[in-house]
Image (spheres, rainbow, N blue to C red):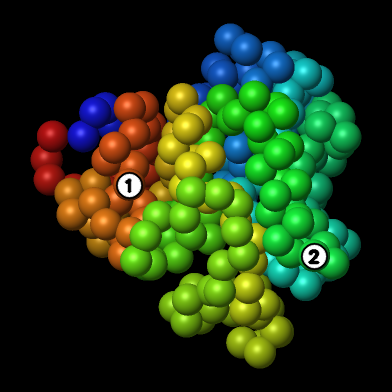
Amino acid sequence: MNKLRIYKGADYNDMSRKAAAVIQAQLTVKPESVLGLATGSSPVGLYDVLAKMYKDGEVDFSCAKTVNLDEYLGLSPDNDQSYRYFMQKNLFSRVNIDIANTYVPNGLAADPDEECARYDDIIEKLGGVDLQLIGIGVNGHIGFNEPADSFPVKTHVEALAEKTINVNKRFFKSVDDVPRKAFTMGIGAIMSAPVVLLIASGKEKAQALKEAFFGPVTPHFPASVLQFHRNVILAADKEALSLFPDR
Ligand code: GLP
């Protein structure tokens, strides 16, 4: 492993503060940063901290650009389960970012393959991602890159794993409402970011974190690819780190 820096938080809020400080620092050093952003339960607290920092004049998003990791196929941007909606609600509407500079795959794209190519084109034209925020699924997925026989490099449509559908059903009325497919940035864009900020909280993530950093590097556990990244910052709480060997 090249370099793994661990910011250990006492709990979820502490983890969120530590992770927010990394993004704040990134925007201070490079105000026009391209931030790769994530959804799910893990970053909600971090976005709350960033919103508060903005209110207090401690962070400025006016020159920032964002590209999100993923989006459900078939959900419109105003569906309250879409990731575009999540981002509007949890971050974009609360800070001074120009919405025209925020990118999320279009869940309603008529031609999904074309949408994938368009998204990779956007990332390329932006010059790549400067800092990529990610969470981790219990099955090791990052973005929606599910366990597979190879690491998909580019943005693609992913059929969600049974486990993912079951974990994510908590956000939907019933399991049948969970979309079966999603657009996701590929492992290539994630690994090309000079900094990857991985956040994880709670004991249900402990095994996944251990496998990601101490298991074999394999596409059957996608997050393990991070062992080949030069600059991963892991912001996690005590429980998520409970299976990490003492360091
Ligand atoms: C979701 C997302 C991922 C996220 C992961 C963990 O399905 N597609 O980007 O990192 O699963 O989610 P959570 O933070 O809710 O545990």
Q: Are marks 1 and 2 in contact (CB under 8 Å)?
A: no
The residue depicted at 63 percent of the width and 73 percent of the height is: 181
**Which residue lies most toward the top here?**
29
Up-down: is 102 above or below 149? above
Regarding residue 241, the answer to whether it shows in the image is: yes
Q: Residues within 10 Å of mark 2 (few under 14, many from 20)?
A: few
Regarding residue 210, the answer to whether it shows in the image is: no
Q: Mark 1 or mark 2, which has the lower sequence index?
A: 2
Q: Which residue is mark 1?
A: 225
Q: Is residue 25 left or right of residue 179?
A: left
The residue depicted at 56 percent of the width and 25 percent of the height is: 130
Q: Position of residue 113 (x, y in %)?
A: 71, 61
The residue depicted at 61 percent of the width and 87 percent of the height is: 175
Up-down: is 90 above or below 5? below
Q: Quadrant of residue 207?
A: bottom left
Q: Residues within 10 Å of mark 1 (few under 14, many from 20)?
A: some
Q: Which mark is residue 77?
A: none
Q: Which residue is mark 2?
A: 111
Q: Is residue 161 left or right of residue 81?
A: left
Q: Nearer the viewer, mark 1 or mark 2?
A: 2
Q: Position of residue 83 (x, y in %)?
A: 72, 57
